[in-house]
Amino acid sequence: MEMRPLHEGKLDRAQTLSNARQDTVYDTIRVTPVTRVIGVEVEGVDLTKPVSAAQIDDLGRALANHNVLFFRDQPELTPEQQISFAKRFGPLHVHPAAAKNEDHPELFVIHTHGESFVNNGADWHTDVSCDEEPPLGTMLQIHRTPSSGGDTLFANMYAAYDALSEKMKAFLCDCQALHESEHAFRDRYSDKGVTDDDMSFPTAIHPVVRTHPVSGRQALYVNETFTSTILDMEREESDALLTFLFQHMKRPEFQVRYQWRENSIAFWDNRCTQHLAMWDYWPDERYGHRVTVAGDRPFHRTN
């Protein structure tokens, strides 16, 4: 039997997972990878000024290629400026449960402090995957940071899919999953003054593996916050498979950890990325504004 070097499989996998193998040549922006697998810092864009169509095109491709874009040296955006920029990527999504800003319902205020009951995004998830047409992407600017902590972790779902065996990929590509939100949203925003007794919350069925409409790559599309079951399986089978996938997605080699500074911005692609917001700074305050770009129905295409 032919023996392979011990490092050979690891090198093959590193090359497979690398986001550097994607289209990284952009005409109007400069991108610097934060890790080999996920995330780039973007320079050459001032989000307080009108952004050209060419830059929007480059940013859209970079988002699909690298999962999450980080903007470090931006001034504090007004709600109008943040909303205006996000709308260049499509109509905006209004959260189905969170407190609404009276002047700008598209604006989601992120605010955690010593009297907060819960932290936004404390479990791994992709934003509002329970919608029939889940969000394309989310843009968050943090205006006030805690004295320490408060990082956000992002994980590459292209990489999570790529790292599976071919047999597992083939099996999952035939699967669909139910995404529910009653358990996640009911009373979730009561500390923000939301009364949801008369509200109903969305559910949706999506492919377990979705095809990204821009990159054409396959990405795992289940998450521990919203995905409750895989259809056409016994409950024990579904639970076991989801437990495996949720643990698999959390592998550190798929991740980047972003340390926020005042007015830092992250813009992530919900079609191929999951994230987790750390709450390791209580009772300090963390405050920012989030806007979310509406998406379309997930699909799986084999070719």
Image (tube, grey):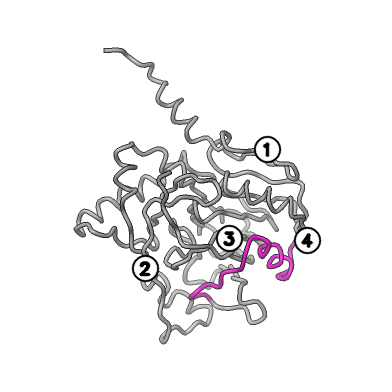
Where does the N terminus fall, quadrant-wise?
Answer: top left
Residue located at (42% from left, 66% from top): 130
Image coords of residue 231 (percent x, y): 27, 60
The residue type indicated by label 2 comes to Glu
Sequence-earlier tag: 3 or 2: 3
Image coords of residue 135 (percent x, y): 52, 63
The label on residue 25 is 1
Against 18, residue 90 (above or below) is below
Q: Decide if residue 180 is on the left or right side of residue 145.
A: left
The residue type indicated by label 1 comes to Val
Against 234, residue 219 (above or below) is above
Residue located beneath label 4 in the image: 48
Sequence-earlier tag: 1 or 4: 1
Q: Is residue 97 magenta?
A: yes
Instruction: Kindly state the secondary structure of the residue where label 3 is placed.
Output: strand
Q: Decide if residue 283 is on the left or right side of residue 265.
A: left
Instruction: Kindly state the secondary structure of the residue where label 1 is placed.
Output: loop
Sequence-earlier tag: 2 or 4: 4
Magenta residue span: 75-98
The residue type indicated by label 3 comes to Thr
The label on residue 121 is none
Residue located at (47% from left, 58% from top): 126
Residue located at (63% from left, 51% from top): 60
Disc 4 from disc 3: Cα separation: 18 Å
Residue located beneath label 2 in the image: 180
